[in-house]
Image: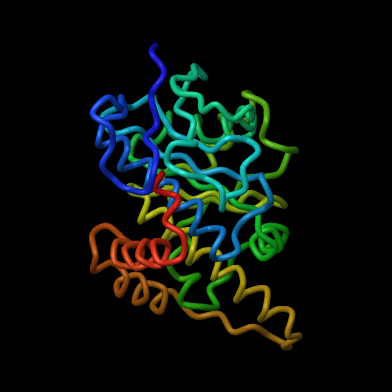
């Protein structure tokens, strides 16, 4: 397959000779923005972790980050494009390659969940702490209400770098849009980049609240009942695709801070 020619500069307009379709370029910019947003909000781990997005109009092609760039360095043209079977369709001239865990985790989810346009994995301090708690996520904040009872749990068996680990991961995720990877971190997915950001932002926030509440040494942390869970979910369910408004605001902020992710 002929190599794609990434555009240069900060403008959305590109050379008429560029081979990247407009729809794919738009998703590349969205995904690069998501990497920058996670850096901005403190949800990174050096060059590790990964986010993928499905290439528009395909079921077996995804975009993902090079194994070597910090999230704040990721741009639209720096993203790899691969098939779910591992064939590389677009390789930036960066000398980095791909993280094996990124391939194992993300191809498994994208293959099993065609509704998952974007898949995002983190292991922050707060989320890893909650993943190590026997009770998992508890209903103690309105953020947690969005996920409590709607989240999978996947036991830790070592780093997710073997193909044989895919089946259990997919089974534990099921039809949820989030899974707590025990002793490891979080994985979320979304129908859009905006929804994936919404899910990781609020799930990470729920983990931070839980860790803070338990670290405060209170004799008992108050948990709310199922009626409160349902009322909270109803309040957030008024928008069909969650996160659109929040994501638009984040994109504006990123453009003010450093629009180089668009390149």
Q: Residue furthest top?
A: 1
Nearer-the-camera pick, 220 or 76: 76
Quarter of the image with the C terminus is: top left
Which percent across, then down, holds residue 9? 39, 44
Nearer-the-camera pick, 153 or 14: 14
Which quadrant of the view contains residue 241? bottom left
* Residue 40 visible: yes
Quarter of the image with the N terminus is: top left
Query: Residue at (29%, 45%) from the top-left corner?
Result: 12
Give the colour scheme of this rendering. rainbow
Query: Residue at (67%, 30%) from the top-left corner?
Result: 161
Query: Residue at (50%, 70%) from the top-left corner?
Result: 144
Q: Is residue 151 above or below residue 104?
A: below
Query: Residue at (60%, 52%) from the top-left corner?
Result: 122
Q: Is residue 242 above or below residue 226?
A: above
Q: Is residue 98 above or below residue 250?
A: above
Q: Is residue 209 above or below residue 67?
A: below
Which percent across, then down, holds residue 187? 54, 49
């Amino acid at each position: 397959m002929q190599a794609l020619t990434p555009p240069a500069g900060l403008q959305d307009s590109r050379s008429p000779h560029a081979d990247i379709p407009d729809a794919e370029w738009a998703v590349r910019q969205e995904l690069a923005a998501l990497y920058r947003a996670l850096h901005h909000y403190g949800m990174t781990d050096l060059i590790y972790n990964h986010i993928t997005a499905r290439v528009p109009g395909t079921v077996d092609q995804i975009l993902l980050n090079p194994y070597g760039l910090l999230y704040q360095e990721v741009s639209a043209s720096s993203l790899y494009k691969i098939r779910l079977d591992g064939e590389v369709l677009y390789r930036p001239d960066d000398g980095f390659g791909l993280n094996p865990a990124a391939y194992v985790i993300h191809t498994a989810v994208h293959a099993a969940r065609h509704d998952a346009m974007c898949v995002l994995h983190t292991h922050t301090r707060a989320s890893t702490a909650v993943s190590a708690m026997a009770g998992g996520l508890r209903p103690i904040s309105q953020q947690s209400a969005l996920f409590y009872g709607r989240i999978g749990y996947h036991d830790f068996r070592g780093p997710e770098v073997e193909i044989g680990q895919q089946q259990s991961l997919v089974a534990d995720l099921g039809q949820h849009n989030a899974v707590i990877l025990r002793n490891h971190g979080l994985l979320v997915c979304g129908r859009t980049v905006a929804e994936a950001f919404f899910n990781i932002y609020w799930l990470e926030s729920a983990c931070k609240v839980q860790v803070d509440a338990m670290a405060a040494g209170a004799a008992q942390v108050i948990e709310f009942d199922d009626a409160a869970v349902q009322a909270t979910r109803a309040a957030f369910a008024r928008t069909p695709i969650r996160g659109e408004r929040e994501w638009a605001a984040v994109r504006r902020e990123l453009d003010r801070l450093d629009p180089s992710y668009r390149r």
